[in-house]
Image: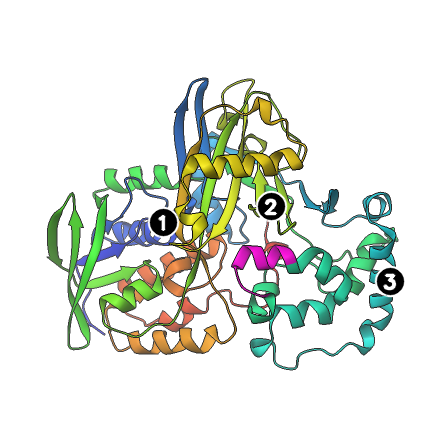
Amino acid sequence: MQSHPPKRVAVLGGGPAGLMAAWRLQQAGFHVTLLEQEAAVGGMCATQTFQGQEGEYRFDYGGHRFITKNPELLAFIDELMGDDLLHAERKSVIRFGGRTYDYPLSLGNLLRTAPLPLMAGALKDLLLLPFAHKPRDFAKASFAEWIQAHFGRTLYRQFFEGYTGKLWGIDPARLSADWAGQRISLIDLKDVARRLLPRRQGRVSVRTYARKYRYPRLGFGQIYTRLGERLVAEGCTLITQAKVTGLVREGNRLSRVRWEQGGNPCEQAFDWVISTLPLPVTCAHLGVPCDLHYRSLRFVNMPLAQENLSDNTWQYLSDPHILATRLQEPRRRSPFMAPAGKSSVMLEIPCNVGDETWNAPLPALRQRVSRDLASLGVDTARLGHETFEARSEYAYPLMDLGYQARRDRAIQALMPIENLIMAGRQGTFRYIFTDTAMEMGLMAADMVVDGIDRRHAIFNHRNENTVIETQSVA
């Protein structure tokens, strides 16, 4: 490592990790150049604004909320956003087989909603749970094995199997149990049962998702738009619509970064490079083999000629025949996400780049999802004629069986490059929350400032197999 502070730092990617890294470095007196491929910063946390016939509609890239247990980060966001940071409360349901289940599960709703065979099967699984085979090695276990060992076959087949297969595009038996460890709030079927029973005074409640959270008035991306504006005001060089085309390596260091903007090739020398680009992309720029893949998303967003669709923030769509995995109503987070008296719907549709869904013309895709919405009881006559679309090629790192070893090999191949730091969801190939990505950006910047190698710590930051949200505060 260099013994003296470098002066020029390239930050590749203007998402949460890249922006926070640039901010910390700018405050420390470094010359920072932030390269962002899109026209605006925010990455997967950006908010798109569309001018419709009835006014402005805003849509996030998915369902983002700001929750964190980091008081320093919380104070920073509070100061950055001021009165534009609202408080919201999450309400979610699962739609499956023509029925609507509360999420997390509640006893009254289950008794009113669940078919008798489901309740009988779950009770049988609960009695057999102590005798169920549990995978010895969590790292090698599949999602299907882990869920059935902890929740039983009945709930797996009803709630997990179809939704998970649709989300990832592979059989859950080929998906790593890592997906379950940090994303499913209840520990096992006994935990479900304890949740459904009336609480006794003094009994410790089981863990669950954080219901309350922070959300910006004009969409989640407002946080990162404002941070980008502040960076520019503080002297950071922000270059948008800049697609990184190459990383020049000389020995154990990167010497230059190449990018293209408006068809024009550009190149500049830097002392350090912090990359939040997808890990396979960075590897490809350096000729490093990397057998890791992503699941993509298409978002179909439509105005709705009514003030409210429902009181749900999320509706998980578990039926395999329904194309989308989640139905969201943006104004449930902030009333400013749609014109006064109007609402909108957003459908998240998982796919792979180049497949039939990714390539489908938008009018055809709208027709398909409109039929799905009708089957869910939405009055499609109230849907406006406009359709606003967004895409994310690198939405979810595909955590199939064996991905950990392939990820580790790619990381080890990059470690000899002393002045390259990877951070963020894409950069570390981790399905993490936004605050974790922001913390990674700060850690990457601190490594540049003090010269202490934190790269392994960044790659494994908050990698515990517990549900992160249960530790968070709103």
Residue at figure coordinates x 44%, y 51% from the top left: 356
47 vs 443: above or below: above
Q: Position of residue 354 (x, y in %)?
A: 38, 54
Disc 2 residue type? Ile
Instruction: Tell which tag, 3 or 1, sits nearer the viewer.
Output: 3
Left or right placement of residue 100 versus residue 60 in this view: right
Identify the residue shown where x is 58% and y is 40%: 327
Label placed on residue 322 = 2
Q: Can the viewer see residue 39?
A: yes
Given contact means CB atoms under 8 Å apart, are the residues at marks 1 and 2 in contact? no
Residue occupied by mark 1: 15
Give the alpha-carbon distance from disc 3 to disc 2, as whole Å: 29 Å
Q: Secondary structure at mark 3?
A: helix
Looking at the picture, how far across and down is residue 400, in whole percent? 51, 69
> Disc 3 and disc 1: Cα gap in Å?
45 Å
The residue wearing badge 3 is 123
For the magenta stretch, what is the residue range?
162-171
Give 1 or 242, whichever is nearer the viewer.
Answer: 242
